Amino acid sequence: MSELLKTKLSVHYANKRSALHEVELAMAEGEILSLIGPSGSGKSTLGLALLGLIGLKGGRAEGEVWWRGRNLLTLPEREWRQVRGREMALVPQSPVASLNPALTLGGHFEDAWRAHAKGDWRIRAREALEAVSLPADDAFLKRYPGQLSVGQAQRLLVGLALLHRPALLIADEPTSALDSVTVAEVLGLLRRVNQEHGTAILFISHDLITVAALGGRVAILEAGRLVEQGETEQMFASPQHSATQRLLQAIEHYRLPPKASVHWER
Ligand SMILES: Nc1ncnc2c1ncn2[C@@H]1O[C@H](COP(=O)(O)OP(=O)(O)OP(=O)(O)O)[C@@H](O)[C@H]1O
Ligand SMILES: [Mg+2]
């Protein structure tokens, strides 16, 4: 597999130096990489920095983000815009915050299309809707976000991100607001997009159970530093770093005790 992305990335905010400290990540074309770490460890900061959006949050990126042979951090904003949303796209966390309630679904696809291309957006919009198992017809495109279930809205966000057939989807906690059945549906969808279209996925999460279901490789972030990375299955079987062990121990709290040890006082 050829290399898609390679970073050595630091990010500083005005009141917080080293929100990320020399994070070295590499991704191959078509690969799934999960990025996990506790709240505040810098996961969203990394996602935004890869998309060149960290300046909007008052952050400053330093180092290197190699993308298909170019260091994105040296590009002027005009060239960045060609990459963002087209070659690399974000699946946001919340449909409610990301969709405009007054704009039809078709309007969303049209806007996303015109950001990078001319001509008829409908052909690709239908293709994207099919890819995420939503109805690919005019009646559906005339609907408004409020007329969708939460699961449909989250799938729509994936569809919008897929519109320009990006090589990489960055999904920042795309399942954290969903019930468990819908989580399974969105995970299945991401896996299928990865397999059928060869789209690489950077899956940001603090939920190890979700990450285990997705497979691929996993990288652990703690306090802005990458502390461990490897194959998901192997890391779950024998975590090396204390941060990974702590994350895994947290899951233990969800486990029920063995049946025999539960006694009801009557
Ligand atoms: N705009 C900002 N200005 C200053 N500091 C910030 C800003 N955004 C994030 N930070 C700080 O940078 C660190 C990393 O934040 P980030 O949002 O990337 O964490 P995260 O891993 O995504 O957490 P969560 O799981 O809660 O989403 C935190 O200490 C946070 O307080
Ligand atoms: Mg975050």
Image (cartoon, helix red, strand yellow):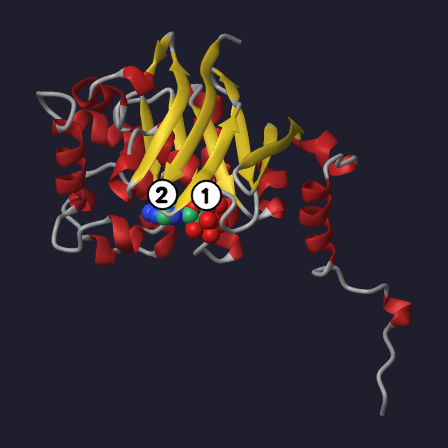
Pointers 1 and 2 in contact (C-beta within 8 Å): yes
Mark 1 or 2 closer to N-term? 2
The residue wearing badge 1 is 186
* Image location of residue 51, percent across then percent down: 32, 29
The C terminus appears in which quarter of the rendering?
Answer: bottom right
The residue wearing badge 2 is 155
Who is closer to the viewer here, 193 or 71? 71
Residue positioned 70% across, 60% down in the render: 254
Can you name the residue that lies furthest to the right here? 260
Who is closer to the viewer here, 260 or 242? 242
- Callout 1 secondary element: helix
* Image location of residue 108, percent across then percent down: 17, 41
> How many numbered marks does the figure carry?
2
For residue 45, side relative to residue 120 (left or right):
right
Residue positioned 18% across, 36% down in the render: 109
Amino acid type indicated by mark 1: Val
Write down the quadrant of residue 170 in the picture: top left
